[in-house]
Amino acid sequence: MEPAVHLRDAVALLGRFPALAGIDLDVRRGEIVLLRGPNGAGKTTVLRVCAGLVPVVRGVATVLGHDLRRDVRPVRRRVGLLGHATGLFDDLTVADNVTFWGRAYRAGDADIAAALDLVGLSTRLRDVPVARLSAGQRRRTSLACLLARRPELWLLDEPHAGLDHDARDLLDGLARQAVDQGATVVMSSHELERAEALADRVVELDGGMAGQTLHEVPHVA
Amino acid sequence: MWRDASLVAGRDLRVEARSRVTINQVAPFALLVLILFAFALDPDGPVLERATPGLYWITVLFSALLAIARSAAVDEADGVRDALRLSALDPAGVFVGKALAVAAELAALEALLGLGVIILYGADPAALGLLGGTCLTATVAVASTGTLYGALVSGLRVRETLLPLLLLPVLAPVLIAATRAFEAALGGVPADGWPWCGLLAAFAVLYSVAGALAYGTLLEGS
Amino acid sequence: MTATTPAGTSSGTTTPTSTDPSGTRTGRGAPGSVGPSHTGSAATRVLGLLALAAVGLLVLYGLVISPADREMADSVRIMYVHVPSATYLYVGCFITSLASGLWLWKRTPGWDALGETGAEVALVFSFVTLLTGSLWGRPTWGTYWVWDARLTSTAVLTALLIGYLALRRLDLDPDARSTRAAVLGLLLVPNVLVVNRSVEWWRSIHQDSTLVKLDPTIEGDMLVALMVGFLALGLVFTWLMVHRFRVAWLEQQADRVDLDAALRERRAEAKGQVAPPAAPDRFDTSDPSGPDVDEKVTPA
């Protein structure tokens, strides 16, 4: 099977600025890869490129078998991006949000209902407008929106930020579960200890480029 | 596309239902404008009565500016644009859904203002078919044009001042046509009004198509 | 070579050189990579002189040679400027819409600059149209403004152009700004048509729709004067378009960042743990933009 992500000397621009300046990255299916590096290194951009949100202007970029330089749209259906922004409508309730986004992603009603259960938001919270939730609860809601679409490739941008200890454990568990079911995870994090424990491989980024794999992290089964 | 449209329309209307901005703020604003017009123009003389169609539609236009700004603001929330791009939603469907939601809100406002004008200005409703047809076509015209232009200025710091500047000249023909149609209905010859209604319908079709085609480009490129 | 030609000489027009990564579409001649100190050239000097000559001729014909009209007396002379001015206003709008559409299709920066140019020059002509119309109204009607169809639609069109130019001036990522402006620009001509139709129709209910009518039986020296008016304003219009386009083009060039230089800078940010790819693929022919510069990047 083709790799989940294959970038070769990829250059991506944000406006006029080359956020990715010729990056090489390979992610096999079923892997969990952690992107590490200083702020401004391009970690978020790599994730957004893989989601098909930022175009690649030079080099090779293939995600889940789709050539991103030809058409990004097929990729978007198959990935789930959890970024800094929540992507939620403040006036609507948790249930409204997850239902809307679930349907927008063409998820089945069963998956939508299951997603709400999986993120551990109590039933009484589901009818609360998002504006009144804490940051951690909002993150869980965003995560539910991602879960509903059951993506093959998870793109997590600093997913642990703003989550309490239990929520972080929950996220790690869900990621592992997804990988066991065939998904792939690429994430960036500053929570190095936890993230490295979760990841199979760590890749260092800087200056818009990726370095060699720093080390393989053996699974603690 | 229609499925996406109804999903998005439902969402926008639900946002409105939960926040109640149109009901609580825009509607009172509209009635207030009607009252201010009465202060500005002597309510005892014939001026107010003769000017009623024009004043009605100007009030609708100003209220529409607010409703459209609110509609555009829903999709400006943090990360929503990205999520829309990642979703399987057809941009044309998103456009139609948003326009339909705005149209529904405007229709309610127009009914309210119609009552206001009857009570406050003593207008005498006649030729209801023409009045209804005008309201329908003008509403679709304003809603579709406004949704497109709302997307043109969405996310910009200056959008509050830029939206009226861009939208009002474009809607000038709608104001002209709707006012003439109303004048024909209320005390004129109703047959004169129907051609204006036709112009409104053509306008509505033009901007519905333009918006559906352009929305995707705007969603991606800006 | 163009790069060594002093900017002040009259041979400043050059064809785009290969170092221009944007791929110009203009036939008017874009300056080479050095950047001239002004937008003049031999062609525009000739054009400018012709325009001046034509304007002079117009003044001669308009004010002196052609006779006063039977009905409108001397104020008919305004028509020789007013009517062409309104025509070129529409030409400018049409250019903007066309350029906007072409930009959305081809995404070449030249079209974007052309769209901006058309709108600005059209705005100039819209002011001329409004002014001349207003000046016509004064001796005829005693007021500076009349709500006739042409003046009214020109006023609305002026507002549309101001709005378009306001959108263009926004502080935004250049591609995003160009996209939004292009969509707005593409709608300009349909908007103008709808506005004109509805205003004409509206005013025709009450009065003759156009103030300054083009009498089809116009002949003789008056016809000549009008033709000279079209010619003179046409030359002025073209001269303005060329210069304004070059300014817009130069502005875009100044904004452009050489991608490879930017890449070098970006890579230099890496603090040593990360090196550029060992075997850089410099022969990636799938990317049409940018020269194939053989980069020698030393790892930090």
Image (cartoon, coloured by chain):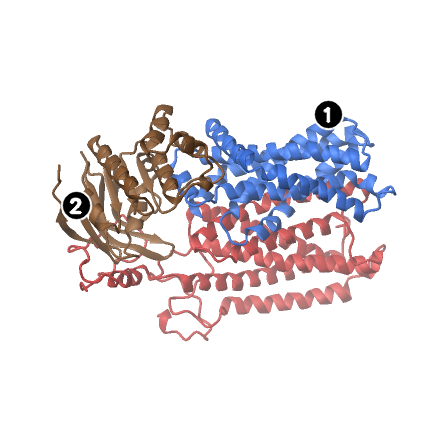
Residue A59 locus on image (x, y percent): 25, 49
Of B187 and C187, the residue lying toward us: B187
- Look at mark 1 in the image and give the residue it sits on: B129
> Which chain does the residue under circle 1 lie in?
B
User: Which colour denotes chain A?
Assistant: brown
Question: Which residue is at 44% across, 69% downward?
Answer: C12
Amino acid residing under circle 2: Arg
Q: Position of residue B147 (x, y in %)?
A: 55, 40
Q: Nearer the viewer, residue A99 or C137?
A: A99
Q: Give the side of residue C21 with respect to residue C201, left or right.
A: left
Colour red belongs to chain: C
- Hey, which residue is sitting farthest right in the picture? B45
Name the quarter where the C terminus of chain C is drawn: bottom left
Q: Is residue A78 left or right of residue C247?
A: left
Kindly indicate whether the residues beneath marks 1 and 2 are on one polypeptide chain: no
Instruction: Give the total number of marks visible in the rendering.
Output: 2
Q: Which residue is mark 2?
A: A201
